[in-house]
Image: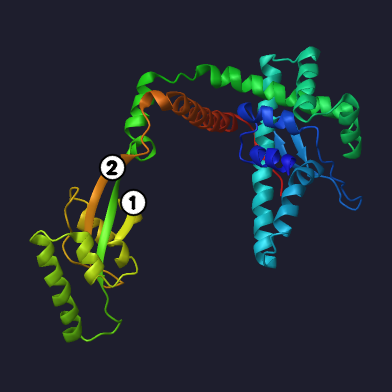
């Protein structure tokens, strides 16, 4: 599962930069895919002077195909999903080739001590001894040399992104303030209402005359409330809801937890005020706003670091996509079906 998470991230083009730590932490669990001897290898794409072979594509796609097959789609749906996955994976392999070409041209390199340190991190995060790691690699059919090469590629790609993208991103206080102010649903306090109700029910399909009789009864209750009668006592005496014995107490609600007609009835009310008579699916109701309170808000100071990280990651992903698109525009890419 851990490898699938890492590979899924690769599919979504986050295979540079921020997912390096994930891939390093999970690289001790690689998957070697056996390719049938009956499959004839061929070139599936040419990226400038590099090629992508069918066996390379099949290896990258195989784990996703396994996941699709266990979903038990219809044959046509399964075929469609696998085709889409192969297309996505091939595009990502092309992006990797373009990035590797940029690495060669930029002169970026990785020292042996960096590889050693990265492997030590993997061992520490997986609680592996050196022997445990080698056993895991052997069980997966991957040699230590192949493993070190993969770690090296990940480090090189991370360095490339640091140079071309991350080093150019600056998140200002103004950016943070703007995001905070424009996302009140995430950070601002939310108004909540402690409500009571009085309800008089009517059966579905009741004729208009009988329904009017029910309305007249609740209207009489409403008039007594307007004259100052206790809502709690009136609920106990008149409400047909199950909470009548509790004086009609409903609980604490934000507006978005209520149906639209109830929202409209109470949103302008103050504490201690009653709504007009509201027709609902359950019957006619009157609502009493017992208390209004603000809950759950977080100040700008409390969320500054959280917002900065969020904006930084968004910017990395946006600039990365733009950067890859520019690489594609300048490249000679031929896909061979």
Q: Is residue 279 left or right of residue 1?
A: left
What residue sits 18% from the left and 48% below the top? 270
Percent position of residue 169, x then y = 49, 20
Q: Is residue 329 above or below residue 270?
A: above
Q: Is residue 266 above or below residue 73?
A: above
Give neighbour class at mark 1: few <14, some 14-19, many 20+ (Cα, 10 Å). some
Number of the label disc, if any, that sits on residue 141 = none
Q: Earlier in the sequence, mark 2 or mark 1?
A: 1
For label 1, the residue is 252
Q: Quadrant location of the N terminus?
A: top right
The answer to whether the residues at label 2 and label 1 have Cβ atoms under 8 Å apart is yes
Identify the image quadrant of residue 88. top right
Give neighbour class at mark 2: few <14, some 14-19, many 20+ (Cα, 10 Å). few
In the foreground, 94 or 225: 225
- Secondary structure, mark 2, is strand
In the foreground, 259 or 134: 259
Number of the label disc, if any, that sits on residue 293 = 2
Q: Is residue 301 left or right of residue 132?
A: left
Q: Is residue 133 above or below residue 36?
A: above
Q: Is residue 107 left or right of residue 245?
A: right
- Secondary structure, mark 1, is strand
């Amino acid at each position: 599962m851990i490898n699938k998470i890492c590979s899924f991230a690769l599919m979504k083009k986050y295979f540079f930069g921020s997912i390096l730590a994930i891939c390093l932490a999970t690289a001790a669990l690689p998957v070697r895919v056996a390719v049938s001897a009956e499959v004839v290898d061929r070139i599936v794409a040419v990226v400038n002077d590099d090629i992508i072979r069918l066996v390379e594509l099949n290896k990258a796609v195989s784990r996703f195909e396994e996941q699709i097959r266990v979903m038990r789609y219809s044959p046509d749906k399964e075929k469609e999903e696998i085709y889409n996955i192969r297309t996505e994976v091939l595009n990502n392999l092309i992006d990797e080739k373009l990035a590797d070409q940029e690495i060669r041209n930029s002169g970026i390199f990785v020292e042996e001590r960096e590889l050693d340190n990265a492997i030590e991190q993997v061992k520490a995060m997986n609680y592996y001894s050196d022997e445990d790691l080698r056993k895991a690699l052997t069980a997966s059919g991957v040699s230590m040399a192949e493993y070190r090469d993969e770690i090296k590629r990940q480090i090189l790609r991370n360095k490339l992104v640091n140079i071309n993208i991350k080093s150019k991103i600056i998140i200002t206080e103004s950016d943070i303030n703007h995001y905070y102010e424009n996302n009140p649903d995430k950070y601002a306090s939310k108004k909540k209402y402690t409500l009571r109700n009085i309800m008089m029910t009517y059966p579905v399909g009741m004729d208009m005359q009988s329904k009017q009789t029910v309305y007249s009864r609740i209207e009489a209750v409403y008039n007594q409330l307007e004259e100052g009668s206790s809502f709690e006592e009136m609920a106990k005496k008149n409400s047909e809801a199950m909470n009548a014995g509790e004086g009609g107490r409903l609980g604490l609600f934000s507006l978005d937890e209520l149906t639209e007609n109830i929202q409209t009835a109470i949103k302008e009310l103050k504490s201690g005020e009653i709504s007009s008579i509201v027709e609902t699916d359950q019957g006619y109701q009157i609502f009493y706003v017992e208390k209004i309170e603000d809950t759950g808000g977080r100040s700008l100071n409390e969320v500054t670091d959280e917002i900065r990280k969020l904006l930084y990651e968004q910017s990395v992903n946006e600039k990365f996509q733009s950067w890859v698109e520019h690489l594609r525009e300048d490249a000679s890419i031929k896909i061979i079906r």
